[in-house]
Image: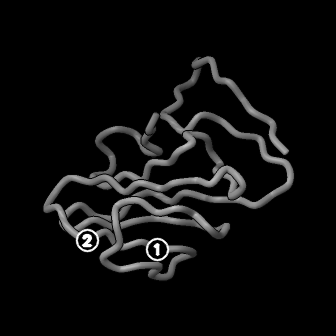
């Protein structure tokens, strides 16, 4: 399923990822989805701080490692998502975690 990467209510624009694990790894064929309140319209994507696409669809397949974020009209900027291309990665579920939660970790390579 889709999981927000920021606490509910702190961002009006959310960057969701599928599969829902963080950090995301390039070899998982990660799909980023930009969701936000406000006026529906074009999504602007950013990779490594630079504009990656303008008037793009709300979904983006990550084809390169780097740091991604998106912006929706009248809703602002999302949090950052890191997409890695490392050989060995320790992942946690891409959801809000609180102290005391049981968490499944994945060590993947």
Question: Measuring 50% from the left and 48% from the top, which residue is drawn there?
Answer: 17
- 18 shown above or below 93: below
On residue 4, the disc is none
Question: Which residue does the numbered mark 2 point to in the structure image?
Answer: 42
- Give x and y (percent) for residue 64: 65, 70
Q: Check the picture and name the quadrant holding the C terminus.
A: top right
Question: Badge 1 local density, few (<14 within 10 Å), some, or many (20+)?
Answer: some
Colour pattern: one colour
Question: Measuring 72% from the left and 29% from the top, which residue is drawn there?
Answer: 105
Closer to the observer: label 1 or label 2? 2
Q: Is residue 52 left or right of residue 24?
A: left
Question: Which residue does the numbered mark 1 point to in the structure image?
Answer: 46
Q: Looking at the image, which is closer to me, 39 or 98? A: 39
Question: Badge 2 local density, few (<14 within 10 Å), some, or many (20+)?
Answer: some
Q: Is residue 66 left or right of residue 35?
A: right
Question: Measuring 64% from the left and 51% from the top, which residue is drawn there?
Answer: 24
Q: Are marks 1 and 2 in contact (CB under 8 Å)?
A: no
- Give x and y (percent) for residue 50: 50, 82
- Give x and y (percent) for residue 53: 41, 79
Dividing the picture into quadrants, the one containing residue 40 is bottom left
- Give x and y (percent) for residue 103: 64, 23
- 45 shown above or below 6: below
Measured in 3D between alpha carbons, the distance from the residue under mark 1 to the one under mark 2, in whole angstroms, is 13 Å
């Amino acid at each position: 399923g889709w999981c927000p990467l920021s606490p509910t209510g702190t961002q009006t624009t959310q960057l969701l990822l599928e599969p829902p694990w963080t950090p995301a790894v390039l070899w998982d064929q990660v799909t980023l989805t930009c969701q936000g309140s406000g006026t529906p319209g074009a999504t602007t994507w950013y990779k490594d701080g630079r504009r990656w696409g303008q008037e793009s669809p709300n979904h983006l397949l990550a084809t390169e490692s780097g740091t991604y974020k998106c912006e929706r009209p009248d809703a602002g900027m999302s949090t950052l998502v890191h997409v890695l291309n490392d050989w060995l990665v320790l992942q946690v579920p891409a959801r809000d975690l609180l102290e005391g939660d049981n968490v499944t970790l994945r060590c993947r390579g």
